[in-house]
Structure formats: C-alpha cells, structure tokens
Image (spheres, rainbow, N blue to C red):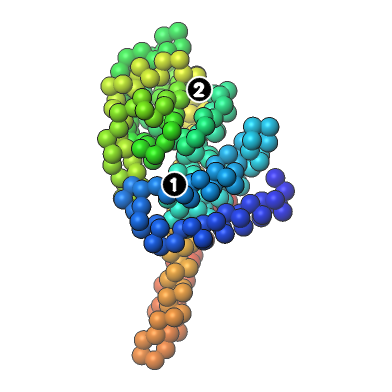
Amino acid sequence: MSDELRSLLLDSLERVLQDNCTPERVQAVDDGGFDAQLWSLLEELGFPVALLPEEQGGIGATLEDLLEMLRVAAGHAAPAPLAEAALLVPWLCREAGQSPPQGIATVVDCGLEVPRLVDGAAAGECSGGPWWVPAGRWADSVMICARTAQGGGVLACVPRQALTLQTGVNLAGEARDRIDPRSVAELLDGGAALDEQALSQYVQLGALARVAQMTGAMEAALHRALQYAAEREQFGRPLAKFQAIQQQLALVAGEVAAFRPT
C-alpha cells in the first residue's frame, strides 16, 4: 500500500470514529457492549477486511497499516472487535489455508490444549485456557485455536450458535464471554492444522495488537490531560503554567512515546 493510500485510509477511519464514537455512544454500550451501527459503517468502508488481498475483497493492507488502524480506533474507545476481526482472524485463516468467515469473527486464544490429533481430528478433552472469547456474544463465527501435546495445533471455524457462552466483561468493560470447555474438542473436529511456528507468531501478533491499542488509549489520555491543563485555571492561571504540572505531563509524554510500537 502506498503512503498516500495509507494516509487516506487512516484519515477516513479518523473521521468515521470522530463522528460515531461520541462519549454518549461509547458510554451507552460500556458494559460489554457493541455498537452495531458503527460496525456496519466500518464494514461498508472495508476496514474489517483491509488485510485481505484485493481479489478477496480487501485492500491489501500491511501489518503496519492494521496496527495503525487499531491505534486510532483505541484512541476513540471504539466499541468494536477490530483487533480480532480485522487482524487476528484473517491472519490465522491465511496460515491455515482457509478463507475468513463472513460477518463478525473473533478468536479463542490458543492457550487451549488438546491431548492429541487422530486422523486430523482433536481427541480428548481440552485443557489450559484462557476460556474467554473477545466479543463472543456479538460474533457470527468463532475461530477456535488449540495446541496439541504433539506440537502444532488445529484451527476450526465454529458458528456462534454452536457455542455455549457465559457472558462476562474484562476490566475495560469489553465483552469476554466464557466458552464451555467440555464441548471444545468436539468442535475442533475437521479443523485445519497449524504448525508450531504459526502458533508462536500468532501469540506475538496478538500481543503486538494489544500494544497498538494500549498506545492509542495512552495517546488519547495524554491529549485530554494536555487539553485540560491548558483550559483549567487555578490561582488565576492555567494549570499548564505550573512547573510541577509541566514535569508530570512531560513524563507521561515520554512514556507514551516509548510505548509506541515501531
């Protein structure tokens, strides 16, 4: 993707989020919620499939492009599972030689373990975890990724309706819905094989996606702090004029700059 196209993509996303991620709308879906109207708009503009090549309906965005998208979206606290649907699911499907599912897709962390594979099918009850599915209740499909004791793993696309989920939220108020471990091994039957390198890279990719999101949230917090310090007055002058406040803001700015992935 050219620099010009990348700039247009991010500018377009910024405008969409500014218009649709108002404090009122974000707070309205705060407890594990999901903004269906925002997601429909993102789908219409092609953001959830940006990583896919043009022949598959995407725009051939790079990993760097996707990480920037996640950073921008997190800065607006966008209530949508972009990290899972736009990055992690398409990447896993590509590694497994599968096409990404239609609709909203999410993924179960590959900390799950099955004892072994027999003729390509999972055998035995899953263990390990976590068992939490990001935005599980809002997804159309769930990609279940599990390791095996023999090395490598298996990836299966499961319709959301086939899963029994117990709703829950994380500390950020995002939906983290618990999957029933007793049914997972059975659902993995017929899944695609993944090698150990792909599983390792997936874990690293997931961590990188969260770093991008945390960076966007930190940048937004710093921006609001700077704005508040410039507007709020104490003892007849803005808070930003006080040396102690300046020092603290400079420390935060340094941490944000160091945190941003390169």
Vertical placement of residue 197 versus 74, above or below: above
Counting from the top left corner in percent of width and height, residue 146 is at 41, 25
Q: Residues within 10 Å of mark 1 (few under 14, many from 20)?
A: few
Give the residue at the far bottom of this rendering.
236
- Which image quadrant for residue 57? top right
The residue tagged 2 is 194
Give the residue drawn at x 57%, y 54%: 13
Give the residue drawn at x 49%, y 65%: 254
Counting from the top left corner in percent of width and height, residue 210 is at 45, 46
The residue tagged 1 is 36
Give the residue drawn at x 48%, y 68%: 223
Counting from the top left corner in percent of width and height, residue 92 is at 52, 30
Give the residue drawn at x 44%, y 61%: 22
Mark sitting on residue 27: none
Give the mark, 2 or 1, whose residue is nearer the N terminus: 1
Quarter placement of the N terminus = top right
* Position of residue 213 in the picture relative to residue 133 (left or right): right
